[in-house]
Amino acid sequence: MANVPKRIFLTADQMPKQWYNVRADMKIKPAKLIHPGTHEELKVEDLSPIFCEELCKQELDDDTAYFDIPEEVQEFYKIFRPSPLIRAYELEKYLGTPAKIYYKFEGNNTSGSHKLNSAAAQVYYAKKQGLKGLTTETGAGQWGTALAMACSHFDLPLKVYMVKCSYEQKPFRKSIIETFGAEIIPSPSTTTNVGRAILEKHPGTTGSLGCAISEAVEVATSTEGYRYVLGSVLNQVLLHQSIIGEETKLQMEMVDEYPDIVIGCAGGGSNLGGFMSAFMRDKLQGKASPKFIAVEPKSCPSMTRGSYVYDFCDTGHVTPLAKMYTVGSEYIPSPSHAGGLRYHGMSPIVSQLYHDGYIDEARAVEQTKVFEAANIFAKTETILPAPESSHAIRVAIDEALKCKETGEAKTIVFNLTGTGYFDMTAYASYKDGTMSDYEPSDEDIANGLAQLPKVNK
Ligand SMILES: *Cc1c(COP(=O)(O)O)cnc(C)c1O
């Protein structure tokens, strides 16, 4: 196509009005969440003390293909959506590839990532239920920021437990979260029983995501009218993120394109799941067969080296068990710079689609190669990508270079999940040559998997 514009926009009126639930088209459904003690499948009543009512229903619904996006959520989305689909002309030229590269840009909001798509929905339903407040945890800070923005919009109090070492390393995340009116507490803290117990046992600890989750859940379940919210992994989160893929599909149709290769980075699987689902629908319905590639860090290789089994969603072991590709909830990944991808497991939907071969490939990439790609992308396309997003850029570049060898003009689309303005320490360490690559040994992986809960399912 000669006349594809650089940026392909939808108008506010063209923004999709429904989320798509890919489970409805899956012949083999993802395994249900089970109770960590009884191993019984969880029902709405079991989940509703932790999560808000409407979200529990979405979580367990494998059959409804489309959910209407509430008017109020659509109005909020219109502040930062529809997001542009961009043709990477400058990157293509730099690579000298015949491939056509497109990317969907989800970083154009203050949280700097796609996470606001689900935060908006989750806060809306909580407010509608008449809840008094929410709690959550945040590691790198993107989710905490997105949720603070949504809570500010819908006027609901929020407590964010932020892993202490990140809290100290990224003081500006705290300032942003407070700007939007939320309370932020470094974890472990003295505000919860679990926090006090951990501090007593390990004075001076800098915390972990699992500990922050345990604190947030304790406050949610012990404070009247409060619930806990999670920014990835869950089916409901992938549902909300489906807006990314629905928009992308419309935008590609506008320029008469259809992808040969669909690429997304995978932490807990929410952006990948939401981005690919519109195209996965075609594959599940036998209408098209694009190649799907999930990209993860070599330091936290749940899909490429993990097992497909039931595991805890958190290191604190307070959450239900989910069947997923996992390297074990006790696996502690090395401190890589892609904080959003340092998760031991993978969304049950993404896991099942990968297990059944609908996601064609999972690829693990090294940190320095990722930052090389990030630097190329920043210089050519002028957007400073998040380290997480740069995993997808790395593979898009590698696939485009393969096309250069074979002379094939494939159409590649990837999801650019966010911007990297808070990750300048990582960019600096790449530039000054101190960045290293870490790959766990077989023993490290085996140790993580040795801690799995025993489940006969
Ligand atoms: C959180 C995050 C991710 C990874 O989370 P998923 O749930 O796997 O999508 C990727 N990119 C950015 C910018 C993030 O903030």
Image: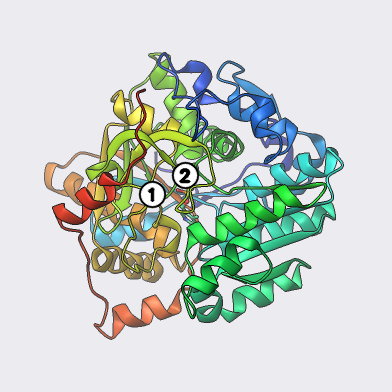
Q: Which mark is residue 313?
A: 2
Front position in the image: 414 or 326: 326
- Can residue 108 be spotted in the picture? no
Image spot of residue 107 (x, y percent): 55, 58
Image spot of residue 188 (x, y percent): 56, 69
> Which corner quadrant holds the N terminus?
top left
Q: Is the CB–ligand 1 distance for label 1 below 8 Å?
A: no
Image spot of residue 233 (x, y percent): 49, 42
> Which corner quadrant holds the C terminus?
top left
Which residue is at a point 65% across and 30% down the rendered structure image?
Answer: 46
Which residue is at a point 84% across and 39% down the rendered structure image?
Answer: 128
Mark-to-mark CA distance, 2 and 1 = 7 Å
Answer with left or right where residue 238 lies relative to residue 55: left
Answer with left or right where residue 120 lies relative to residue 378: right
Front position in the image: 7 or 174: 174
Q: Which quadrant of the structure image shows residue 213?
A: bottom right
Q: Is the CB–ligand 1 distance for label 2 below 8 Å?
A: no
How packed is label 1: few (under 14 Cα within 10 Å), some, or many (20 or more)?
many
Which residue corresponds to mark 1? Answer: 329
- Disc on the earlier residue, 2 or 1: 2
Q: Which quadrant of the structure image shows residue 151?
A: bottom right
Please tell me whether residue 249 is drawn above or below residue 147 in the rendered image. above
